[in-house]
């Protein structure tokens, strides 16, 4: 029986904002996640590494039930994701910012409208001035206050990523899920995005999961790293643990940046 939003809130996760236990997810015969257990602690930047197709995007989509999972348990901010009804799931999703791999902006809307859209939907209590102030603050945080009235087509790839980030943080999420935030960007812009991720974490006290292939981004942002392989967590540790590892698979990841 469904117990409602507050009743499904467990007390077991005082300092973990996400707890994933024995998660399984298949598409037909293809087992993508066979047994993933993982915690995201309050205030940390958890970097998830793994080769293409290892299920990184699937994993974070399961966290907000953009994809239904087959078995296991996911607890987010104390709520049992598998048990929430759609209304309560909608409420929970307001607390979780999701920066999609594609970073899709609404092409027919100005930057201002792109940010206004989630804000008016999620923060209904705000008055006009508060909405305008929050939009400007989010844009200032990504260094693009002057892009307010621009259309997405007038922006470069890096600027679009920044605006996507501004659109995600404008509603003050307590958890951020970043899917490949620096993919397709030049090294300088990638570095700026990594710096922004750290600034967002400090300023908004967010806890984040950052999926990346970009080892420099991992180096800049990671409080902790996990590597996904064959549907399960292959290794968990600090940046130093990974950099010092003799494991061939891990070495292959860290060699790509030439260090
Ligand atoms: N909606 C879906 N329907 C069917 N299969 C899917 C779906 N989404 C993902 N998959 C499959 O799940 C596997 C993992 O996909 P996922 O997108 O999570 O990989 P990834 O680790 O994020 O890879 P990349 O680094 O390339 O983004 C892939 O084999 C993919 O084809
Ligand atoms: Mg992916």
Image (spheres, rainbow, N blue to C red):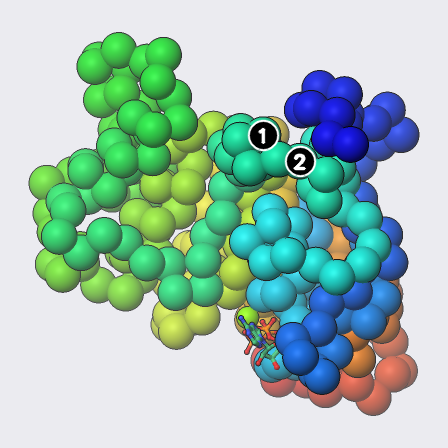
Residue pictured at 79% horizontal, 65% vertical: 24
Q: Is residue 18 left or right of residue 157?
A: right
For the C terminus, the quadrant is bottom right
Q: Which residue is mark 2?
A: 84
In the rendered image, the vertical position of residue 251 relative to residue 170, given as above or below: below
Q: Is residue 46 above or below residue 35?
A: above
Q: Secondary structure at mark 2?
A: loop
Instruction: Tell me what residue is drawn at x 32 percent, y 13 percent.
Output: 126
Q: Which residue is mark 1?
A: 88
Position of 76 with respect to 153 (left or right) is right
| Percent position of residue 19, x then y | 80, 44
Asked whether mark 2 lies closer than 8 Å to ligand 1, one says no
CA neighbours of label 2 inside 10 A, class few (<14), some (14 to 19), many (20+): many
Q: Residue 18 occupies which quadrant of the picture?
A: top right
Query: Which of the 4 image quadrants contains residue 68?
Result: bottom right
Q: Is residue 48 visible?
A: yes
Residue beneath the point at 65% across and 75% down: 27
Q: Are marks 2 and 1 in contact (CB under 8 Å)?
A: yes
């Amino acid at each position: 029986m469904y117990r409602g939003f507050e009743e499904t809130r467990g007390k077991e996760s005082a300092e973990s904002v996400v707890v994933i236990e024995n998660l399984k997810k298949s598409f037909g015969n293809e087992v993508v996640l066979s047994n993933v257990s993982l915690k995201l602690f309050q205030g940390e930047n958890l970097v998830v590494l793994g080769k293409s197709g290892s299920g990184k995007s699937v994993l974070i989509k399961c966290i907000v039930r953009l994809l239904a999972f087959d078995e296991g348990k996911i607890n987010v901010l104390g709520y049992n994701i598998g048990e929430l009804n759609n209304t309560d799931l909608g409420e929970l999703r307001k607390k979780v910012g999701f920066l999609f791999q594609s970073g899709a902006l609404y092409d027919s809307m100005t930057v201002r409208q792109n940010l206004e859209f989630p804000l008016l939907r999620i923060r209904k209590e705000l008055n006009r001035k508060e909405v305008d102030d929050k939009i400007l603050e989010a844009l200032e945080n990504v260094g693009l206050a002057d892009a307010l009235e621009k259309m997405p087509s007038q922006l470069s790839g890096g600027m679009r990523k920044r605006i996507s980030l501004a659109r995600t943080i404008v509603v003050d999420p307590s958890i951020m899920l970043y899917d490949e935030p620096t993919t397709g960007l030049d090294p300088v812009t990638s570095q700026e995005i990594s710096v922004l991720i750290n600034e967002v974490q400090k300023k908004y006290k967010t806890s984040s999961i950052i999926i990346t292939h970009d080892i420099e981004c991992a180096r800049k942002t990671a409080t902790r790293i996990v590597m996904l392989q064959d549907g399960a967590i292959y290794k968990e540790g600090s940046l130093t643990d990974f950099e010092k590892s003799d494991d061939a698979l891990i070495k292959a990841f860290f060699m790509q940046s030439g260090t």
